[in-house]
Image (cartoon, grey):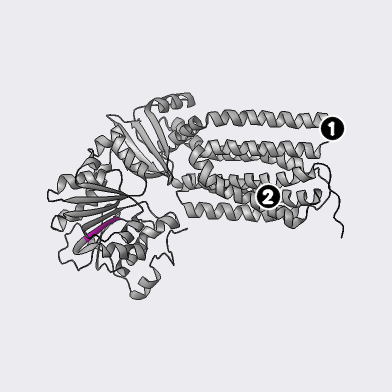
Amino acid sequence: MTQPSQKPGDRFSVPSLLFLGSFAATATQLLFVKLLESFTRHEVFSYTVIVSTAFFALASGAKKTIVSSSTKSILPYQILLLIGAPLFFLSLFYFPALLILNQLVQTGGTAYLQTDQFELVIPIALLFVFFLSRWHGAEIPLLSNSGNIQFGTALGISYLGALAGYLLIPFVFLPKLGLLATLFSIGFVYGFNCFIAGFYVLKTFLLRVSVCVLVLGFSFLFALGFGRAHELQKWQKIFFYANGLDAWPEQTFNTFQSVLKHLNSKMQVETIESPYQTIDLVSYQNVQSKDLRLYLNSDFQFDSSTEKQYHENFLKPLSLLKKQPARKILILGAGDGLLIRDLLKKNQYLEEIVLVELDPEVIQIAKHNPTLRQLNQNSLASSKVRIEVNDAFEFLRREGEQFDLILIDLPHPVSFALSKVFSLEFYENVRMHLKEDGALILDAPTLGSENIVQNTLRAAGFRSLISFGDGNTFIFAELSKIDYLPAQLQILNVQSEENLNSQINSIWTPKLPLLF
C-alpha cells in the first residue's frame, strides 16, 4: 500500500510533538509522584497510584480520540497542557499551605491539622494527573494520523520521549534544580510544543502571532517562577512545617499578612539536596529559645526541644537490664551525632563507636551546623568515633568485626529500598556481627508493621525481644534468653510458627512497606 504523502513541516513537527509531549507528560507525572510523596511520606504508594492513574488515562484518551486526518484538535490539546500542567501542580503544591494559613488566621495562631486533612491531596492529585494524561493520550493517535506516520513509529517516538523523562527528571533536573524550578523548566517544554503546534496547524499570520504571544506570555511567567523558585518553595515548606508547631502560643493573628510577617521573622528553612534525599533544617523561635528540627524527605527526624527524651528512651534497656558496659558499639544511621553524644557521656568504658551513615551531607551538617554541633556537643569529633560513609547493608556484608552493642536508627520503610534494612537478610547480617552476649536496639516502625519486624527478628535468630518506649517504639533484642526483666519493660508476645513464617520481611518476599 502506498504511504500517503506528508504535509510540509510534518517531518519535523509531528515527531517533535510526539517526543517532547511524552517527555513533558512523563516529567509531570514524576513531579506529582514527588509532591504526593512529600505529603504522604510513602514513596511506594505515591508512585503506584500516580503512574497507574496516568497509564489508565493515557489509554482512555487514546481510545476516545476520533481518528481523523484533521489537525484542528492538536493545538487545543497543547494549550490545555501549557496552562493546565503548571496550574494544577502549583494549586496542589500550595494546597496544604493554604489550609494551614487559613487555620492560623481562624484560630488566632494555632494550626494542628490532622493527617486525614492532608489526605485530601491524594484524590485531587489523581484527578489532575488523569486529565493531563488523558489529554496527552488523545494526542498520540491524532498526531500519528494527521502526520501520516505509522502508528508503531509514533508509539516508538513517544516511548523514547518517556524514557528521556524517566532518566533526566530524577537524575538531573530534581537533584540540580529542585521541585519548582523543574516544574517551570518543563513549562518551557510545554510552551515550545504549543509553538510548534501553532505553526503546524494554523495557516494565517495573525493566528500564528496570537499563539506566539500566548507562548511568550507564559514563558515570561515561567522565567519569573524559575528565578524565584527557591523562595517560593521555601514559603511552602515554612507553612507545611508550621503545622503543629507551638512556637508562638501568645501570638494572635487576624490577617493573612500578619501570619506571613510573623512566620518570616520566626522561622527559617534551609534545604540541602543530596544524591540520596532532601534535607530540611527548620529553625524556629520558641517562647524561651531558638530550636531546630531536622526533616529527611519531609519525614520528621528530631526536634531539639524533645530529642533528649527520645535518645534517653533509646538507651534505657542498657541500665535497666544491668548489662555490662559495651566497649565496642556499632551505630547504623543516626548521623546527627545525638545518640553518640549520650553514649560518650554515659559509658566510661567505651573504646570505639563505629558510625555508618549513607549520606555524607548529614555528617557535614552534624559537624558544621552551629546549632546541631552545639546540640550533639561536637560528638563526631571524638577520637573514639570512627565514621564510615556507606550503605548499612553493604557495610555488614563487607566487614567482619563483632560488637558488644548494635544500635539501628534508620528511616522507617516507606520504600522497597528502605525495606531491605528491615529484612531477614539484614538482621541475619546484624546477628553475625554481634558477640554472643551482645545486644541489639532498634527504632522499629509502628502503624501495623511492628509484628512483621518482630517476627523477622525472631526468624533471624534473636531469642529475646523486648518492646519499650512510648507506644513501644523501640525493640531490644538478644541472641540468648533474658532471665531478668524489669517491670518497665515487657516481653513481646510469642506467635505461632505458622503465623511467623507468613509475617517475615525478606528481600525476595517483601512484606514492607505496607501500602494500606
Q: Is residue 497 above or below residue 218?
A: below
- Find residue 293 and report its image quarter: top left
Q: Name the amino acid, label 2.
A: Arg
The answer to whether residue 96 shows anywhere in this view is yes
Q: Quadrant of the N terminus?
A: bottom right
Please, what secondary structure does the residue beneath circle 2 have? Answer: helix
- Mark 2 near mark 1, Cβ–Cβ under 8 Å? no
Report the predominant secondary structure element of the magenta stretch: strand
The one of 402 and 284 positioned closer to us in this rendering: 402
Q: Magenta stretch: give its range.
A: 439-443
> Mark 1 sits on what residue?
204
- Which mark's residue is nearer the viewer, 2 or 1? 1
Tell me where residue 24 appears, x and y as whole percent: 63, 44
Tell me where residue 261 appears, x and y as whole percent: 43, 24
| Residue 442 lies in the magenta-colored region | yes
The one of 474 and 379 positioned closer to us in this rendering: 379
Tell me where residue 258 appears, x and y as whole percent: 44, 24
| For residue 314, side relative to residue 448 (left or right) | left
Sequence order check, earlier mark of 2 and 1: 2
At x 71%, y 44%, the residue is: 16
For disc 2, the neighbor class at 10 Å (few under 14, some 14 to 19, many from 20) is many
| For residue 177, side relative to residue 497 (left or right) | right
Residue 134 is labelled as 2
Tell me where residue 391 appears, x and y as whole percent: 36, 53
Distance between the alpha carbons at the discs numbered 2 and 1 = 29 Å
| For residue 7, side relative to residue 287 (left or right) | right
For disc 1, the neighbor class at 10 Å (few under 14, some 14 to 19, many from 20) is few
Q: Name the amino acid, label 1.
A: Thr
Please, what secondary structure does the residue beneath circle 1 have? Answer: loop
| Residue 42 lies in the magenta-colored region | no
The one of 423 and 109 positioned closer to us in this rendering: 423
Residue 467 is labelled as none
